[in-house]
Image: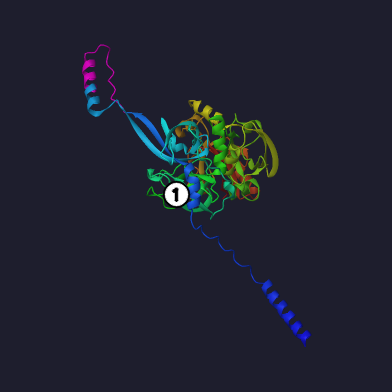
Amino acid sequence: MTNKLSARRLLAGLAIAGALAVLPPAPVLAAPAPDSFADLAETVTPAVVNISATQVVEDKTVDLPKLPPGSPLDDMFEEYLKRRRQQNGEGRSHRSNSLGSGFVIDPSGIVVTNNHVIDGANEVEVIFTDGSKLKAEVIGKDAKVDLAVLRVKPPKPLASVKFGDSDKSRVGDWVIAVGNPFALGGTVTAGIISAKGRNIDSGPYDNYLQTDAAINKGNSGGPLFNMAGEVIGVNTAILSPSGGSIGIGFATPANNAQPVIEQLLKFGETRRGWLGVRIQNVDDGIAESLGIGKARGALISGIDEKGPSASAGFKAGDVIVTFDGKPVADARALPKIVAATPVGKEVEVTVIRDGKEQIRKVTLGRLEENEAKAKKDKPELAEKAPPREEKTHVLGMDVAALNDVLREKFKIKDSVKTGVAIVKVDGDTPAAEQRLSPGDVILEINRQAVNAPAEILAQTKALKADGRKTALLLVATAQGQSRFVALALD
């Protein structure tokens, strides 16, 4: 009897165990909110500072009219202007102040803030939590990532904070922001990371952390801390119709900020890698036209003739899918990767050309040097020219061979050397949907250069005969910026 009872209990136990084995796993419970942020705030707040930037502006004065030397009117105008200056205070200077936030990253006196906090300032002062003030020297600044590095000379080592790994931060993690909103002084707000990788179109390297921790005017340049007291972001911008916090703030991730800060400390300026290409995203139509399968990578739409890419054999139409061993998901990703790569480094780049992958090696130039050179270059004057050719209608557009008459009419730069000019675009056509417009110049179709409307017609017929659904055009604007456009064939 005992043996039978034991067997029954064993079978019952197995049945229960079996039932438990097929039950769904228990839901993961969210981590509880901190009871208080007080200990964390007390630890990090001494390293957060207020930044006062002063710009001395000369008031404008009324200029004397240009009179012949020795004119009897000289004395009359001079007396008039003298009385005017006395009455209105003209000819004097006034001081314009702006306030922001910052934080100390080195006890010897290295402070980080936003570039827009101190840009244009004649004097910068750092104000500490104990009320003490120190004049600051601007070591370097960068408008593209909106960062500036300052140096003060303290009588004793300062409280400082360290950067954390912003890549490890997750959406939903708790954070606190510390800063100087509305000039109120050290203020702590708490929230979570709402999103990562935000692009707000403020610059070429946008990759912001979004947070609902309250960030207001004056918080710019202040730190965003994780729960370990590490700086994972530099508070930079807010989205607000009212000018106050509505729970959408943006911080430059620490992993984006640190390389820039290191360059500013070492060189007093940034030294970004430069490839010398113009790029665009690959959409489904372009991917189909190029035969690369799914849309991915960064499509080269133009080559700087004097840039590193030209001598390395890159071509318009190449799709960059990896750069220096790093995957290139889309056109937004490539500039960040290239800029973070050391100037002068030889890197391997994987491109897709004619549907096949190939590796090209290129030695990077320096972005800042190219930008400085571009500012000095002046556009050449357009030449006068022969009469306009007759128009041809194709792909929902009127096109004509590029000539000097069309150059003058549409202000087409000489950098657009050849091609077929678009003179009219029909409404409700694929060309209109792709925002093609009169003055654009078709450089290629189906990867073949074109210089006459008849060549576009021939290539279009060839594509239809091959059963292709789209025509891939390389098109330049009148200013010389080129891009690929996939147009559906009729």
Tell me the amino acid under the disc marked 1.
Val
x%, y% of residue 334? Answer: 59, 41
Q: Is residue 478 visible?
A: no
Q: Which of 313 and 96 is in front in this view?
A: 96
x%, y% of residue 25? Answer: 63, 67
Q: Is the magenta stretch mostly helix, strand or loop?
A: loop
Q: Nearer the viewer, residue 83 or 357?
A: 83
Q: Which residue occupies the extreme bottom position in the image?
A: 1
Residue labelled with disc 1? 188
Which class describes the residues within 10 Å of circle 1: few (<14), some (14-19), or many (20+)? some
Instruction: Give above or below for 62 relative to 229.
Output: above
| Residue plotted at (52% across, 52% down) | 195
The magenta segment: 59-81
Q: Would residue 352 appear left or right of 79 to someone viewing this image?
A: right
x%, y% of residue 158? Answer: 50, 38
Q: Which residue occupies the extreme front position in the image?
A: 156
Q: Would residue 378 appear left or right of 310 to someone viewing this image?
A: left
Instruction: Give above or below for 239 relative to 83.
Output: below
